[in-house]
Image: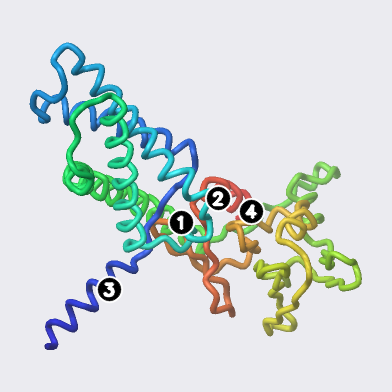
Amino acid sequence: MVIFVAMLQAVTTFLNRPIAEDFRFKTQIWQAIQTGIYVFLFIYFFGGPSFGAPNRAGMLALFGAGCAVSTLMANWLVPILFSRIYDEDRWVVWKYILHTLFVLFCISVGNQLLLVLTQNDYPPFIQMYLIVTLIGFFPIISGVFVTERRRLKRNLAQAQALNRQLTQRAEPPLPDLSDSRPTKAEIATEVESKPLVLSSESGKERLTLQPEQLLFVESVGNYVEVHWLNRNEVQKTVLRSTLKEVADALRTYPQFFRCHRAFLVNLKCIHQTEGNARGYQLTISAVSTKIPVSRSYLDAFDTRINEVL
């Protein structure tokens, strides 16, 4: 019984493990093309004397194209139509497995339609679905986990490098007194030290802070929650505004960076970073909330934090 419970917990943990996914058209069109080529080659070499010999290559190319279109629709169009379900930030293993079975279902429907339209013999749909699943399920799953492993390795290495920077922050260079003109660093410091003002959409609510007081901002529905320091105590102020409006108000302060669709963070307040397959998790001193850096912001985040630190 204990072994069964332990196995059940292990399976549950695995199925709920976060997994990275990219539903953007640029990524999915390439994956769809790869799927079409894979189907063509697999049936050509292992499918036996399918279809008439004179038209065999043409028919297989048609099926490869059909599989590519079905894959693109399932992996790109459907996530757009059902964006709440296909939330990349809440994508886990069990969702991915179900989605893979759905993709294979779409491919089976496409194949069955092509067989009917081209007046070829076709098997019962359940048989078609089983054949497509046997051919495609494990290559798809294996490819995703290999890609995830690669992303995880990259993000862990970047997070470790960033942690070394955070623990060994260099002292600012001594100013050159021979030149009275302000340096770029001095100009940036002057900008960063100016008080910032955040206001609600109506302008009736205003919050004025020193830049070093602002820790992070989180978008919650039609409001933003501003987390800031008041004499070393973390305070939260809720404003009716959007994260985009907050980011626009802070655009002259380079230390503030939008790292996620729901979070904007003060890069100078980051205490530690952790890497995972999706991106980073940021830790800020005196705050228990983990700030995510999503995949689409990773490159810009790496560039900006190197500039700020």
Residue at 62 percent of width and 67 percent of height:
269
* Residue 234 screen position, x and y as percent: 67, 81
- Circle 2 Cα neighbour tier, 10 Å, few/some/many (<14 / 14–19 / ≥20): some
Q: Nearer the viewer, residue 160 or 27?
A: 27
Q: Which mark is residue 308?
A: 4
State yes or no: discs 4 and 1 in contact (Cβ < 8 Å): no
- Name which residue type carries label 2: Tyr
Q: CA distance from mark 4 to mark 1?
A: 20 Å
Q: Which mark is residue 200?
A: none
Q: Which mark is residue 297?
A: 2
- Name which residue type carries label 1: Gly
Q: CA distance from mark 4 to mark 2?
A: 16 Å
Q: CA distance from mark 3 to mark 2?
A: 30 Å
* Residue 248 screen position, x and y as percent: 77, 53
Q: Which mark is residue 12?
A: 3
- Name which residue type carries label 3: Thr
Q: Which mark is residue 279?
A: 1
State yes or no: discs 1 and 2 in contact (Cβ < 8 Å): yes
Q: CA distance from mark 4 to mark 3?
A: 41 Å
Of labels 1 and 2, earlier in sequence is: 1
Q: Nearer the viewer, residue 229 or 77?
A: 77
Residue at 39 percent of width and 33 percent of height:
69
